[in-house]
Image (cartoon, rainbow, N blue to C red):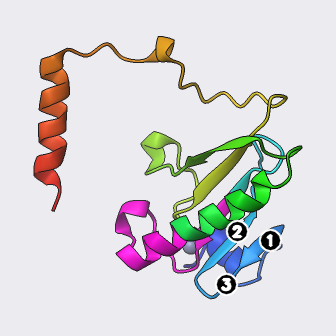
């Protein structure tokens, strides 16, 4: 798609630090890395959001993400763990409107700010949990 940075990278109109590529997916270093080794995995067909991918596209995206993750984890200085993240739409922080998965390596030395500590969790009642679960499950097809 015109004016899409990722499509331009896929079409080799812009340079990238590519770590993996096949006919459907490309994985490259994020040019604005949050930590060392921050990698993006990008389906080659232009789709704005993860929710728009076909099952095959989503499967290939996740399998490639796992493959790159394993490579990162095999270099202990780069990754002792990782966060896998897909931002769905601008409200969730998606800045490039071409779906991509982030692999954010975690080490004891880097301090990426994503916080899953229980102290920052919401306090919901049993009824609230039930209502949210019901709403989601009713929309599954
Ligand atoms: Zn694109």
Which residue lies under the disc numbered 3? 22
Rendered image: mark on residue 18: 1
Residue at the spot 36% in from the left edge and 74% down from the top edge: 55
Which residue lies under the disc numbered 2? 27
At mark 3, the secondary structure is: loop
Residue 79 seen in the figure: yes
Q: Which residues are magenta?
A: 40-61
Q: Is residue 78 above or below residue 47?
A: above
In this rendering, would 86 be left or right of 124?
right
Q: For residue 91, which quarter of the picture?
A: top left
**N-terminal-most mark, 2 or 3:** 3
Residue at the spot 52% in from the left edge and 80% down from the top edge: 45
Q: Residues within 10 Å of mark 1 (few under 14, many from 20)?
A: some
Quadrant of the snapshot with the N terminus: bottom right
In this rendering, would 123 be left or right of 46?
left
Place of residue 137 in the rendered image (x, y in percent of width and height, measured from the top left): 15, 47
Quadrant of the snapshot with the C terminus: bottom left
């Amino acid at each position: 798609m015109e004016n899409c940075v990722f499509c331009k990278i896929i079409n080799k109109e812009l340079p990238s630090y590519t770590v993996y590529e096949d006919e459907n997916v490309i994985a490259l270093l994020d040019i604005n890395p949050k930590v060392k080794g921050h990698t993006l995995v990008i389906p080659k067909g232009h789709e704005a959001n993860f929710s728009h991918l076909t099952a095959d596209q989503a499967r290939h995206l996740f399998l490639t993400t796992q493959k790159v993750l394993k490579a990162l984890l095999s270099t202990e200085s780069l990754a002792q763990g990782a966060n896998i993240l897909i931002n769905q739409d601008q409200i969730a922080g998606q800045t490039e409107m071409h779906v991509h998965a982030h692999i954010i390596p975690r080490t004891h030395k880097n301090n990426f700010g994503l916080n899953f500590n229980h102290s920052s969790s919401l306090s919901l009642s049993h009824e609230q949990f039930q209502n949210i679960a019901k709403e989601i499950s009713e929309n599954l097809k």
